[in-house]
Amino acid sequence: MQTFLNSIPKELINFLLVSVFSLLIGLSIRKLHQMDDEKHIFGTDRTFAFIGILGYILYVIEPVNHYLFAGGGLALVFLLGINYYFKLATFQRFGLTTIMIALITYCLAPVIITQPMWLSLIIVVSILILAELKDTFMVFTDKLDKEEFITLAKFLIIIGIILPIIPNERLIPEISLTPYRIWLAVVVISSISYFSYLLRRFVFHDSGIIISGILGGLYSSTATNIILARKSKSSNDKDLNKYSAAIIFATAMMYLRILIIIIIFNMSLFVRTLPFFIIMIILTSGIGIFMLYYKKQHDNTDNIEIINDKNPLEFKVAIIFTLLFIAFSFITYYTIKEFGTSGLHVLSVLVGITDINPFLINLFQGKYEITETIIALATFQAIISNNFFIMIYSVVLSNKRNRRKLLVGFGIIIVINILLLFFI
């Protein structure tokens, strides 16, 4: 088979690829304009196939300077310009999509001949997908406002502009704290939060209590559980199971979020702790599922958006995280220096009352004179402590009829997590 394929002239293969890809693009254009009057457009399937073939012929006839190919391109632009002028003057139609796709189709030949096959496929697939998603993009843009683009711009700035230019020299020789490490921590947390925000804003915009708990837990399990607990106070009996389950699911997502952070900053620690995180994610999710279906009553009320679409890239949030990260860098270093591993164990328990992400990221990427086992123990101790305080927040703030379930659920999670400490 391979011998047969090798015997086929490369020029024939390129010609067939240009013809087939151009025809596919033309068919997609016909589908795109199938509801339009034919006189509004200059052509569809056969026209685009001929444009691609024309580009191939003019490119291979004069393969050195490509004057013929350039001249053919100018002629095509001239003809398309005339068509657009009369379409604009006669029908008042301003769209340039079909014209742009025609020009790309004309350029397929040099791409297929000179570039890797994967690039040609990506170009064709992108054209087909983008042409078909016209209505989807129109619906999507209706949901956008200027704040969304500002948020996207902020994300691109912090990850693509600021991060590469920040120096990676230590601020203090004794502490492995550099501007780059500080900003990298901000980038990682912002990326996870922004991903959760996009899912909640555009994919699960009309999500109910359970989805809100899951996505909110990916952003901040503590904040999500406090909001869910408060909301449950004013809920009806039919929704109580959903609120308690959502709180537990948010906690399960906290384990997943920390596991993602470990993958980014400390791969060897990830390999060591992965089984324990899998156990806790499965256990916590199982408790959430049990709570959801425990004495379940059928209702149709699970269509309420619980978590607000709050911008995860607010400047104030970034400043607070940065300050906490710097503070924990100093605190962790001097705690280990003065009190050793016993001091770190105490510190990991105390940080549970706050956001544990700055402490954990600092621990994962810090160069402390402690073993990987100690880091793993400190990680789970901080998680246990954080779960304990989240349990207190949830029980105090939630509906009275939910308190026993939350106490039992969090109690099981905390006890199992403590037992796992003996196997690390």
Image (tube, rainbow, N blue to C red):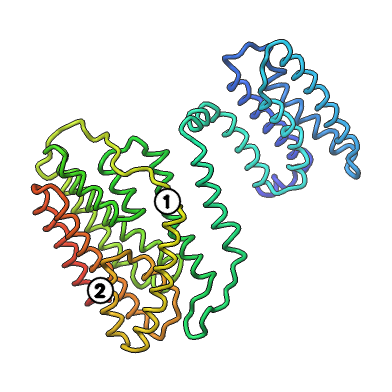
Number of marks in picture? 2
Residue at x 53%, y 42% (from the top left corner): 149
Q: Secondary structure at mark 1?
A: loop
Q: Which mark is residue 326?
A: none
**If you read the primary sequence from the N terminus, does the residue marked by circle 2 or circle 1 appear first?**
1
Real-space CA distance between mark 2 and mark 1, rounded to the nearest whole angstrom: 27 Å
Looking at this view, is 193 or 261 the one in front? 193
Left or right: 312 in relation to 234: right
Considering every residue shown, the one lying at the far front of the view is 316
Please say if 250 is above or below 178.
above
Residue at x 23%, y 68% (from the top left corner): 384
Please say if 269 is above or below 393.
below
Left or right: 112 in relation to 136: right
Please say if 397 is above or below 208.
below
Residue 103 percent coordinates (x, y): 74, 31
Residue 262 percent coordinates (x, y): 40, 67
Q: Which residue is mark 2?
A: 349
Q: Which residue is mark 1?
A: 312
Left or right: 41 in relation to 159: right
Q: Categorize mark 1 by other alpha carbons within 10 Å: few (<14), some (14-19), many (20+).
A: many
Residue 192 percent coordinates (x, y): 42, 55
Residue contact between numbered discs 2 and 1, judged by CB atoms under 8 Å: no
Corner quadrant of residue 268: bottom left
Corner quadrant of residue 278: bottom left
Q: Amino acid at mark 2?
A: Val
Residue at x 36%, y 63% (from the top left corner): 258
Residue 96 percent coordinates (x, y): 68, 26
Q: Amino acid at mark 1?
A: Pro
Q: Quadrant of the C terminus?
A: bottom left
Looking at this view, is 380 or 125 the one in front? 380
Looking at this view, is 129 or 117 the one in front? 129
